[in-house]
Amino acid sequence: MQSDMMKVSIDGAVATLTMTRPGKRNAMCEELLQALDAFFSAPPKDVRVVILTGTEGHFCSGLDLSEHVHRSAEDNLYHSRKWHSVMEKIQFGGLAVVSAMYGAVIGGGLELAASTHVRIAEPSTIFQLPEGRRGIFVGGGATARVGRLMGADRMTEMMLTGRKYDAETGVALGLAHYAVQEGEAMGLAQELAGKIARNAPLSNYLMIQ
């Protein structure tokens, strides 16, 4: 379950997944996507809650474009469908997932965060969907998940203009549930994860569904 791209640590009923691509602001490459898929496809038996975070000051800066340019149009279609499959497992697999966010929550990183159930943002957090400025389109479910969080109209403007939102505005729009001070996201994530883990497992499952 461990990967060079993702560190997994387990403390009782809570697993912490840390994306570890510091030189790439934790951009989503094929190996990182596969690591997430592997964990959520067969999570450890006693884990009830997952904390998802990044390293070196960033959550996830989205799709690794260095891999994207080498894919054919057909490959991109299948890759997009795979991304959708993984996000579905995160959102509806039965585990409650808490995102501790800072720095880049951009493109696919925002799609990833939107598939989680509790989102905490530090002041450095930047929410953005800049794909249009790179000649591509969102492929991991943003038009569904992000649109449900903030509304289709605001999301359309956000995509068209490349607009960035900070943590406080993100809370107001529904992109995050909590805005905390620098260095506080993980502490609150652990506190909330512990609280969620003490719920009845079936209750959590039904609430997530």
Image (spheres, rainbow, N blue to C red):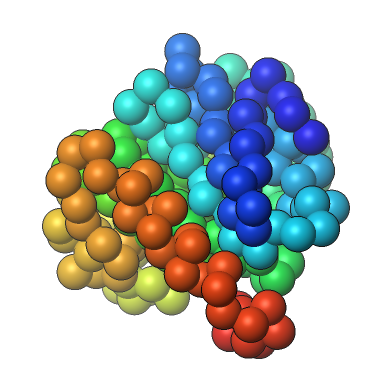
Percent of width and height locating residue 38: 80, 43
Nearest the viewer among 73 and 181 is 181
The quadrant holding residue 84 is bottom right
Q: Can residue 100 be seen here?
A: yes
Q: Where 193 sits versus 78, above or below?
A: below
Residue at the (63%, 82%) spot, across then down: 200
Q: Does residue 130 appear to the left or right of 183 in the view shown?
A: right
Above or below, 52 relative to 114: above
Q: Residue at x 42, y 37 (%)?
A: 59
Question: Can the viewer see residue 157 in this picture?
Answer: no
Task: In this rendered view, identify the residue nearer to me: 67 or 22.
Answer: 22
Say which quadrant the N terminus sits in. Answer: top right
Q: Residue at x 64, y 24 (%)?
A: 5
Q: Judge whether 162 appears above or below 207 on screen.
A: above
Location of residue 150 with respect to 186 vertically, above or below:
below
Q: Residue at point 34% right, 35% down?
A: 104
Tell whether 23 sits left or right of 79: left
- Residue 94 at x, y percent in the picture: 70, 71
How many numbered markers are drawn?
0
Residue at the farthest top position: 23
156 sits to left or right of 1: left
Instruction: Give the quadrant of residue 33.
Output: top right
**Residue 22 in the image: x percent, y percent?**
46, 18
Percent across and percent down for residue 196 are 51, 71
Q: Quadrant of the C terminus?
A: bottom right
The front one of 26 and 6 is: 6
